[in-house]
Image: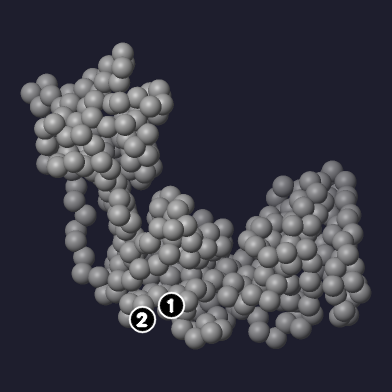
Amino acid sequence: MKFSIERAALLKAVSQAQSVVERRNTIPILANVLMSAEGDTVSFKATDLDIEVIDTTPAQVERAGGTTVNAVLFHEIVRKLPDGALVQIAEDQAAGRLAVTAGRSHFQLATLQKEDFPVMATSDYDASFTCDAKVLRRLFDKTRFAISTEETRYYLNGVYMHVAEGEDGRALRCVATDGHRLARVDAPLPEGAEGMPGVIVPRKTVGELRKLLEDDDAQIRVSVSETKIRFATEDITLTSKVIDGTFPDYARVIPMSNTRKLEVDAADFARAVDRVATVSSERSRAVKLSLDEDRLTLSVNAPDSGNAEEELAVAYADEKLEIGFNAKYLQEIASQVDRENAVFLFNNAGDPTLMREGDDRSAIYVVMPMRV
């Protein structure tokens, strides 16, 4: 194998691949990226046995072939090469080495045989559909913050993607929850998605997928089966196993009868929470919301460090209410708001609170209160 490629194109392809690789591996080949040169393209494949990513990029191929090299080391070398460099890569099969040359820089890297590289089993997909990158980005970006990190409740360690009845008919829906907060976001159901099984997309896959969705104009081909999900652009294919578990009935925890309505500027609210939370104890980070007519008072009382209070002008016309929340949860939910106003709907100090973005009902958030 021998080919030449621009440093920028190589770095982009290798970055996507190497990020999938687990840093601590008991199987040496899993630390490697498989590069295969053929025709006028080179593909870079990496896997951790749960996720597989393949990035294909144009190159000047002199001799077809393939080999594997340590992904993190290769990425570091390419990252440190000068911008605009033409990188020449050649495999010496007999010596088990890969030569990387750019200008006056020369590297000889150890390789492992490509035949030992694991192949993810193919899957028959139950549904395939095409979706705009910006639509998928919104679905996952607005829900990922609520993914649980508690490994014992593994079925909450991802985003539940499924078909559901939304405000305006059937929708492609993403939901995530950790038991303390919940995010539910809908998008119009793409053609071909009707028969899609509901799947839980793992946290790591959601992180890797985000890199495919940077281009607003990109079209993403999504294929779903009971055990796998695949996201593909023209250059990159990301295939992942889904979490083998049953996502809980999230509809039961979404309050439908909360009547006390608070409307507040989302950015002002998030900044005020951040300021008063500065004095809160790290363990609880509790902030109290005191609501009166068109006035919201945010306060924190931390005996060890002090107290803080800030008042905001809001739209609120219901009876007085005092309710406490984890400051981090409030900030994360408020930061999801794309519109100017956040609308909070309360019942009482002990019940879940609902939040939505202005009059947009396609995205709703639920946060549990805490005692303060």
Expressed as whole percent of the image width and height from the top left, the position of residue 115 reads 12, 41
Expressed as whole percent of the image width and height from the top left, the position of residue 46 reads 28, 44
Q: Is residue 283 left or right of residue 135?
A: right
Q: Is residue 205 left or right of residue 253?
A: left
Quadrant where the C terminus lies? bottom right
Q: Does label 1 or label 2 sit earlier along the sequence? A: 1
Expressed as whole percent of the image width and height from the top left, the position of residue 40 reads 18, 41
Q: Return the residue at label 2.
A: 194
Q: Is residue 176 left or right of residue 345?
A: left
Q: Quick check: can you spot residue 79?
A: yes
Q: Which quarter of the figure has residue 102? A: top left
Residue at point 30%, 50% (across, down): 235
Q: Residues within 10 Å of mark 1 (few under 14, many from 20)?
A: many
Expressed as whole percent of the image width and height from the top left, the position of residue 259 reads 76, 83
Q: Is residue 9 left or right of residue 340?
A: left
Q: Return the residue at label 1.
A: 189
Residue at point 90%, 71% (across, down): 294
Residue at point 46%, 83% (across, down): 170
Check disc 2 and give the amino acid type: Glu
- Residue that extends furthest to the left in the rendered view of this protein: 94
Toward the viewer: 232 or 219? Answer: 219
Check disc 1 and give the amino acid type: Leu
